[in-house]
Structure formats: C-alpha cells, structure tokens
Image (spheres, rainbow, N blue to C red):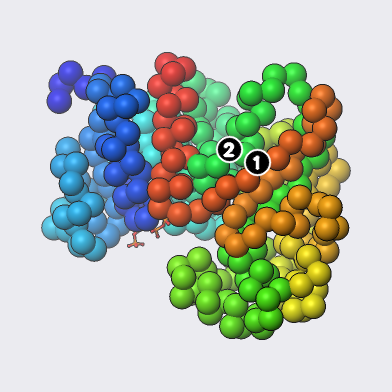
Amino acid sequence: MDSVKTKIMIVGFGVVGQGFFDLFHSKKESLGLNNVEITEIVDKKYGYIERPPIDLTEKINGKTDYPLIDPAKAIKNSDASIVCEFTWVNYKDAEPAFTHMKTALENGKHVITTNKGPVALRMDELKTISKKTGNDVLFKGTVMAGTPSFNIVKLIPGAEVLRIRGILNGTTNFILEQMSKGSDFGTALKEAQKLGYAEADPTNDVEGFDSAAKVAILSNYFGWKHRMSDVQREGIKNVSREEAAHGTKLLATISKTEASVAPLQLEDTDLLRHVNGVMNALEIETDSLGPIYTMGPGAGRKETAQAALTDLMEILNKN
Ligand SMILES: NC(=O)c1ccc[n+]([C@@H]2O[C@H](COP(=O)([O-])OP(=O)(O)OC[C@H]3O[C@@H](n4cnc5c(N)ncnc54)[C@H](OP(=O)(O)O)[C@@H]3O)[C@@H](O)[C@H]2O)c1
C-alpha cells in the first residue's frame, strides 16, 4: 500500500459512490492505474471504511459496522490527494457537499463531484479556493452523467459556443414520451417511479429544478454567469397529452442572454424532438461548426460513475 502514488477518498457511498468504486476496480488495469487506489470511504450510513476490500459493494448489502465519523473531519485527516464527493443534492445551500468540497480543496486535494448543488449554487466560491490552492474541481457527472457534454468543447479548440439547447432530464423526458402514447401525467409518473427513473418525491425533476441546476452549471462553464435563481423555470405539470404527442419536450436553453427551462413544442425537423425515453441530448451551437450534438444516458449507477472516472483520468493525466 505504501507504494501507492495517488490515493482517492470517496465521500457518500450510495448509488454513484458504489458504482464508481466498482467501475474503478473493473477498469483499473486497462487504464494502467496500478499506482492509484481508493484508500478511504466515508458515508453517513456506512461509516468510515479504510483500505476497503475490492469486493466491498457485494459485502455491505445496505449496512456495515464501520465507525461513524464526521466526513469533514475525515477529509481533513486524510492523506488522499483526490476526494470524490457523491452525497445527496441540496438546492437550498448545497450542504453538506459544499463543506466537504471546500475542506478537501483547503487541504490540498483535487475534487471530483457528481453533485449539482455546490456546482450550480456556489461554484464561484469553489473556484476562488481552487485558484488559491491550485487544486481542481471537476464535475462532469453533473450534466448528462458520463455522456460527453460540456467537456466535448475541449476537442474543438477556438470554437466559440454561442448557444446551447438540451434535454437534460431523463425522468421528465420519459414521462412526456409515455404521455405522447396516451398515458395521463399521474400514470406516467408512477411508471417512472416503478422503473426507478423518478424518486418518491419527484419535485426536483417534474418542476424543472434539476434541469435548472444544469442550466446554471452550463452557463457558468461557458462564462455566461446565469445563477440558478436567474433561470426562468417551468416544469411539465401543465403539459397535456395532446401537447406531448405533438412533440413537446422539457427544453433547456442557455446563451449569454437566456437561461430557461420550459416545455416547448419542437418542430419535426428538430433532432431534439426525437430524443426519447430517459436519454439526454445537447445541441451546442458554435461559430465554426454550427450545431453539434451529443446524446446518451444522463443518469444511472455505471453511467454516472463513468463521469467520475473521466474526471479522474483528466486529473491524473494533468498532474
Ligand atoms: N444516481 C444517479 O444516477 C445520479 C446521476 C447524476 C448525478 N447524481 C448525483 O450524485 C450524488 C449521489 O447520488 P446517488 O444516486 O449516489 O445518491 P444516494 O444513493 O442517495 O447516495 C448518497 C449517499 O451519501 C450519503 N450521505 C448523505 N449525506 C451525507 C453526509 N453528510 N456525509 C456522508 N455521506 C452522506 C447517503 O447516506 P444516507 O442514505 O444515509 O442519507 C448515501 O449513502 C447526488 O448529488 C446526485 O444528485 C446522481
């Protein structure tokens, strides 16, 4: 263990934390990460786990006997150089994730997160600390999980991004598709819950908060600075079956002058109209290429873990 060069700590060991743990171990060899290890995990429910065995997720089965300790304290005392923050999302003040990320940065660690709260609400504060300490905050998983999204522009240097349109919430897209086939809203929502696409409390998805957070994240990434509270937001509750059948989608639109989430009827010639089920898609309008498109899963255990793995490789390749 002492020959390990890069140590990773996971904070929050739910769906994404466990997905990342397993994906990391399954890809470790092919990615040549022999000197990289997940050495610590801290979670509210599972406790503090040091030097976890690689079959941990098979063993824990909902419960462990590990000691419960304060995650911020664990981060401070950790010798890991990368902290992966995967706790629950909070759109009021972004806590406790913000404190976890701040503590990590202040203690000389890079941060990877899939948590939209701190990135949508408090990215400026995180950027200031990150600039001061020289440590990175990467957040690919906050938009379209592991599917390339904003990070795709790194492949087109010099291209100016003029406007973005996107379907950024799979749950509402699934519900609208069910409605387009004749379901009413309530039945479509229940189906989404049964399939694990919607949470017991679907407010964040249905009312457009999740998409609005992603609009704020994209806006910040492209330097347009719309805050989450600036995003004009309307959910899908008032969409009728007829409107859904005529191509109404919950569309996110972002440019220097616009930040909105609203149900909009799209033309049949619009590629975004044909994004179905829980898929997400982004149209990025650029000055040199015109529109480019990316489409793929926007959530899921392995799919979101892929985003954190992508961020991990970026940090390792840079340092
Ligand atoms: N699942 C996805 O497909 C997906 C996709 C994109 C982004 N995300 C984001 O990724 C993050 C993790 O999602 P998830 O699906 O893995 O959620 P999850 O299954 O609910 O897991 C979160 C874990 O963090 C723990 N936790 C909560 N508060 C904590 C604290 N103060 N300190 C330490 N641990 C704490 C939770 O314990 P308790 O259960 O005891 O509260 C739980 O084990 C969320 O911010 C989510 O919005 C998820």
- Quadrant where the N terminus sits is top left
Q: Residue at x 78, y 54 (%)?
A: 260
Q: Position of residue 37 (x, y in %)?
A: 25, 30
Left or right relative to 1: residue 265: right
Q: Amino acid at mark 2?
A: Pro
Q: Position of residue 79 (x, y in %)?
A: 26, 28
The numbered disc on residue 294 is 1
Q: Amino acid at mark 1?
A: Thr
> Are there few (<14), some (14-19), or many (20+) residues within 10 Å of tag 1?
some
Q: Nearer the viewer, residue 242 or 204?
A: 242
Taking 314 as reference, is 194 above or below it? Answer: below
Residue at the disc numbered 2:
148
- Dots 2 and 1: beta carbons under 8 Å? yes
Q: Nearer the viewer, residue 5 or 131?
A: 5
Left or right relative to 318: residue 260: right
Q: Quadrant of ligand 1?
A: bottom left
Q: Residue at x 72, y 62 (%)?
A: 250
